[in-house]
Image (tube, grey):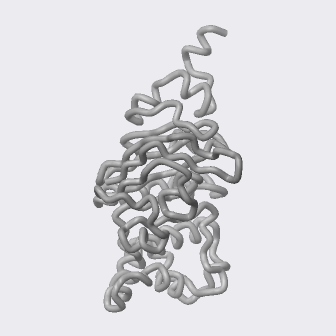
């Protein structure tokens, strides 16, 4: 579904991404993991069109979208749920969902909202409340539901567990698994590498704007270098050396 080929993104003279390449197969969850400043969010922003590519290509369903505007990418089926949720705090839950479906025909919006309220019952209970009054976990569910209102072919999730309590983190990752089981393709950026790879088929490990490791998520979970560096190790092999 998605092919990123030699993508470089710069902030002025600084290369935030350095010729990264990766792919996402339809119907899978693929994760980008790594420490703060690795370039994970920059990669998502480049894919969604919020940042321009300095060089390289972004291919979506066989079509080069590298120079396409962000709103054209939404219409093509790429939707990003941003880090920090960024719900429209002064608008109601219902209004946030309506705006999520702005690119869909009007007759589909009511149906989409009903589907989201069925999937996330708490949003039905809170439909008339201002989004800014919701808890962090409820706002994250609203942000995901708002993204799904556009009926994305590819959903980009940026740090969905950020700042949430452990029980809510577990719930969010259960939602991600359920979405994938329903056929949704997801590119997931997440600092919680263990949780991310537990729901992913494939993972790419980023550091300093580059991809330094990649492979099947289960295999990477057993990689001692990855565990030591990114999963809060030390690994069993490292312990044996101590």
The image quadrant that residue 21 belongs to is top left
The image quadrant that residue 91 belongs to is bottom right
Q: Residue at x 37, y 68 (%)?
A: 77
**Count of labels in the image:** 0
Q: Nearer the viewer, residue 86 or 131?
A: 86
Compared to residue 140, the image places residue 56 above or below, namely above
Q: Nearer the viewer, residue 234 or 152?
A: 152
Q: Residue at x 66, y 85 (%)?
A: 90
Q: Quadrant of the C terminus?
A: top right
> Which residue, as the protein is rendered here, is positioned at the far right?
13
Residue 122 location in percent, x, y? Answer: 50, 75
Residue 186 location in percent, x, y? Answer: 40, 55
Q: Residue at x 47, y 31 (%)?
A: 221
Residue 192 location in percent, x, y? Answer: 57, 44
Q: Nearer the viewer, residue 122 or 62?
A: 62
Q: Is residue 38 left or right of residue 110?
A: right
Q: Quadrant of the N terminus?
A: bottom left
Residue 177, visible in the rendered structure: no
Residue 85, visible in the rendered structure: yes
Q: Is residue 5 left or right of residue 242?
A: left
């Amino acid at each position: 579904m998605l092919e990123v080929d030699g993508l470089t993104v710069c902030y002025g003279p600084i290369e935030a991404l350095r010729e990264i390449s990766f792919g996402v197969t339809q119907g899978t969850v693929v994760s980008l993991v790594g420490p703060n400043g690795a370039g994970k969010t920059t990669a998502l922003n480049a894919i969604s069109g919020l940042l321009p590519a300095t060089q390289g290509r972004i291919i979506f369903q066989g079509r080069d979208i590298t120079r396409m505007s962000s709103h054209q990418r939404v219409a093509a089926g790429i939707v990003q749920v941003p880090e920090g949720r960024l719900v429209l705090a002064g608008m109601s839950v219902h209004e946030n969902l309506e705006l999520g479906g702005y690119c869909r025909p009007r007759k589909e919006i009511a149906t989409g909202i009903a589907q989201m309220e069925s999937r996330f019952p708490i949003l039905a209970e809170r439909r008339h409340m201002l989004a800014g009054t919701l808890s962090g976990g409820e706002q994250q569910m609203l942000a995901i539901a708002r993204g799904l209102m556009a009926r994305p072919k590819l959903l980009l999730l940026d740090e969905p567990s950020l700042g949430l309590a452990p029980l809510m983190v577990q719930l969010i990752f259960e939602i991600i698994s359920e979405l994938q089981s329903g056929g949704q393709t997801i590119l997931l950026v997440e600092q919680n590498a263990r949780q991310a790879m537990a729901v992913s088929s494939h993972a790419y490990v980023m550091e300093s704007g580059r991809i330094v490791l990649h492979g099947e998520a289960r295999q990477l979970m057993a990689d001692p270098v990855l565990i030591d560096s990114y999963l809060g190790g030390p690994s069993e092999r490292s312990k044996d050396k101590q």
